[in-house]
Each structure stands twice: as structure tokens, then as C-alpha cells.
Amino acid sequence: MIEQCACGSGQLFSSCCLQLISGERQATSPEQLMRSRFCAFKIANGSYLYETHHPDFRGNLTAEELTLSAKQSNWCKLEVVKSQLDSNSHGTVYFRAFFIKAGYLYCHTELSFFSKYEDQWMYQRGEFPGDSFTPKKLGRNEICPCDSGKKFKSCCS
Ligand SMILES: [Zn+2]
Ligand SMILES: [Zn+2]
């Protein structure tokens, strides 16, 4: 179970993104929604990812597919580079999300578009500008890239 919220807020998961994922409260900005969706990827909660994906942009996606795709990577760290509100119903978040696969650290860079649907912030779609980040092999005794302070072998490996 995650203690510190993986979104990088410095708060506990239970008082941060978990409250959004569990439906206790709603995101009040695109960035908050984006952060909670990152955590939902981390814990492979496909139904939250589905519910927060704008119905007009969801296509044929299913919650099951989202759970499966989330499980394929070990999401470990989020960096929000820039978030912008374009109006009270549209906004973007530019972020870097780091994940681990087979002992290597990778970076997923995305400009995400959000809009409100029935008064709730929803994810529309992403653009992928590319990143100069080179996949990095992680040593077992190295400090884990998730910033837990633990060694990689006893953390996100
Ligand atoms: Zn959080
Ligand atoms: Zn870790």
C-alpha cells in the first residue's frame, strides 16, 4: 500500500489522490485530476481512469483494458512541468511520468488536454512531444527513483 502520495504532493495518499479515486471529493483543477489519474495508473484502477476519461474522447476503451495497460508498467514518479487553465472549463497539463520496466527507468512525456463534462474535470486526450530522456538501467542498491529514500531492490523493482 502506498503511504506517501505518488503524485509528488508530499501528502499522504489517504489525504491526497485516494480521496479523488475513491469518490470522496472531486478534482478542482485539471492538474489535480491529472495527479489522481497518475496514482490510478500506479495502483491499476482502470475504473477510475475510465470514469475520468471524457465520454466524447473515450472511444471503445474499457475499464478492463485500462487496468491491464496500467499493470504493464510500474509507475513510480510524476513531475508536473506546467499546468495551465485556458478557461473555466478547459485546461492542459504538461508532465513527465516515470515508470520502470525490466529494471530500466523510462519517461513518458505528455501534454494532456482536459475539459469539464457535467461539471467535472475529465481527461480528453494527450499529445506526445517526445523527450530526450534516455532509459536508465537501475542498480539494485541504488536509491529508488520514486524518492522514497529506499533502495531500488526493496522499493519499486
Ligand atoms: Zn496525490
Ligand atoms: Zn520506489
Image: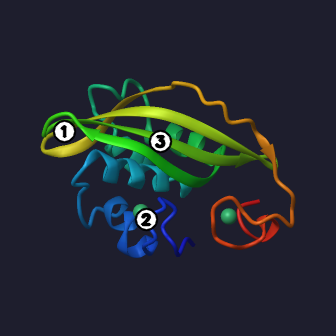
Q: Is mark 2 within 8 Å of ligand 1?
A: yes
The residue carrying pointer 1 sits among few (fewer than 14), some (14 to 19) or many (20 or more) residues within 10 Å by Cα, namely some
Q: CA distance from mark 1 to mark 3?
A: 20 Å
Q: In the rendered image, which residue does mark 2 sit on?
A: 9
The coloring applied to the image is rainbow
Circles 1 and 3: CB distance less than 8 Å? no
Q: Is residue 86 left or right of residue 8?
A: left
Q: CA distance from mark 3 to mark 2?
A: 14 Å
| The residue at label 3 has a CB less than 8 Å from ligand 1 | no
Residue displayed at 63% across by 61% down: 146
Q: Residues within 10 Å of mark 2 (few under 14, many from 20)?
A: few
Q: Residue 93, how many percent across, how many down? A: 37, 39
Whether 154 is drawn above or below 98: the answer is: below
Q: Disc 2, disc 1: CB below 8 Å?
A: no
139 versus 113 height, above or below:
below
Identify which residue is drawn at 41% across, 74% down.
14
The kind of residue on which mark 1 rests is Lys
Residue linked to disc 1:
116
Residue 9 location in percent, x, y? Answer: 43, 65
Residue at numbered disc 3: 95
Residue 69 in the image, given as x and y percentages of width and height: 58, 39
Q: Residue at position x 52%, y 62% from top?
A: 6
- Local SS, label 1: strand
Mark toward the viewer: 1 or 3: 3
